[in-house]
Amino acid sequence: MQIFKYISIVALLYGSTSCEKDFPITLPDVDNTLVVEGTVNQWSPDLNYVILSRVVKYFDPGLNIQPVSNAQVFITEGVKSGSDTIWETPVQFKESFVKVLKAKVPGVYVADGFKAFVGKIYRLQVTTPTENVVGYSELLSAPLLDSLTYKEVFDVDGKSIGYNGVAHHNDPPERGNNYRIIYRINNDSIPSLWGVPDNQDFTFSDELINGIYRDRQLRVKLEKSDTLHYYMASLDRPLYNFWQSFSSAQGNGGPYATPLKLQSNIKGATGSFSAYGIAYKYVIIPK
């Protein structure tokens, strides 16, 4: 998850920067910080998982990340009833999130047959010998992603230099919709989808595009025979705030930068618990 990258950057800046006069800087203690990346969605059971790990030391040259394998992980489903939430907890949902593939993927918790549904609220509970973590997220309807096309791009001399993907998206008339985009080229693997690097993800709201049909051109170069995979998700406001603060923290560089606090939607750890209403399209550039 890119949280790890942010922590390493902050540590590097504080550890290596100096000026004419040295000033003592006290960093927060992050030894053994529990990091949580949990997601549920209505589109693919493969994206219903919880990953637990620890950031061991700020100044570890390898930024030692250790998986957490001794936790109890519970996902509980609920529905709104006025201002309250009624929790509907089939036993198999609460007991079946277990660590899988111990030798290959430690710290990963999944549940065979677990399905999430639009309109439900989900509660994450993680218990370790030293922590109790809880987080909530509402699974909203998938975005109105109409289609995904491509557009040929030319240089100033009129010579073709490749293609850009174009996503066609309609925002509903109701205000307050929040979105997260992930796109990948020639790679449709989806584990840990929402933490992919290389600027292939961004988050936005409908504050400036409310009720508008939009043709969003992706500034990514595509060649003939490439396949563009485009994932668009609806998020509730707390989850949107998390990703916005995450992006701000990533861009808060410079030798005199002050670390920004992530607006996490979980308590008792660092990270997020994410319910996504996912829409997916792909397009192949012909030979």
Image (cartoon, rainbow, N blue to C red):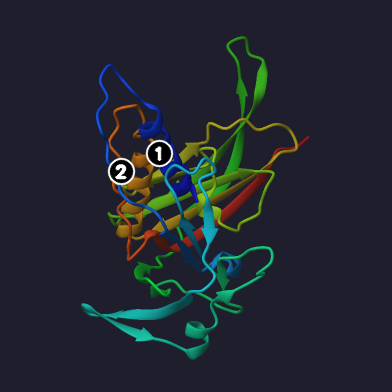
Residue on which disc 1 sits: 11
> Which residue: 47% across, 78% down?
72
Q: Amino acid at mark 1?
A: Ala
* Lower sequence index among marks 1 and 2: 1
Do residues under tags 1 and 2 come within 8 Å of each other at their CB atoms? yes
| In front of the other: 225 or 38 | 38
Q: Quadrant of the C terminus?
A: top right
Residue 134, label in figure: none
Residue 27, label in figure: 2
Tell which residue pokes out farthest to the right in this image.
287
Instruction: Point out residue 70 in the picture as x, y percentages from the top left corner.
Output: 51, 74
Q: How many marks?
A: 2
| Secondary structure of residue under mark 2 | loop
| In front of the other: 54 or 167 | 54
> Which residue: 42% across, 34% down?
12
State the separation of the CA atoms marked 1 and 2.
9 Å
Q: Going by the image, does 264 lie left or right of 6?
A: left
Picture quarter containing residue 98?
A: bottom right
> Which residue: 29% across, 48% down?
261
Picture quarter containing residue 190?
A: bottom right
Q: Residues within 10 Å of mark 2 (few under 14, many from 20)?
A: few
Instruction: Point out residue 39 in the picture as x, y percentages from the top left corner.
Output: 48, 64
> Which residue: 53% across, 76% down?
115
| Secondary structure of residue under mark 1 | helix
Instruction: Point out residue 138 in the picture as x, y percentages from the top left corner.
Output: 36, 68
Q: Amino acid at mark 2?
A: Leu
Picture quarter containing residue 108?
A: bottom right
Decide: is 115 above or below 274: below
Instruction: Point out residue 21 in the picture as x, y percentages from the top left corner.
Output: 25, 20
Tell which residue pokes out farthest to the bottom in this image.
91
| In front of the other: 64 or 201 | 64
Decide: is 23 above or below 183: above
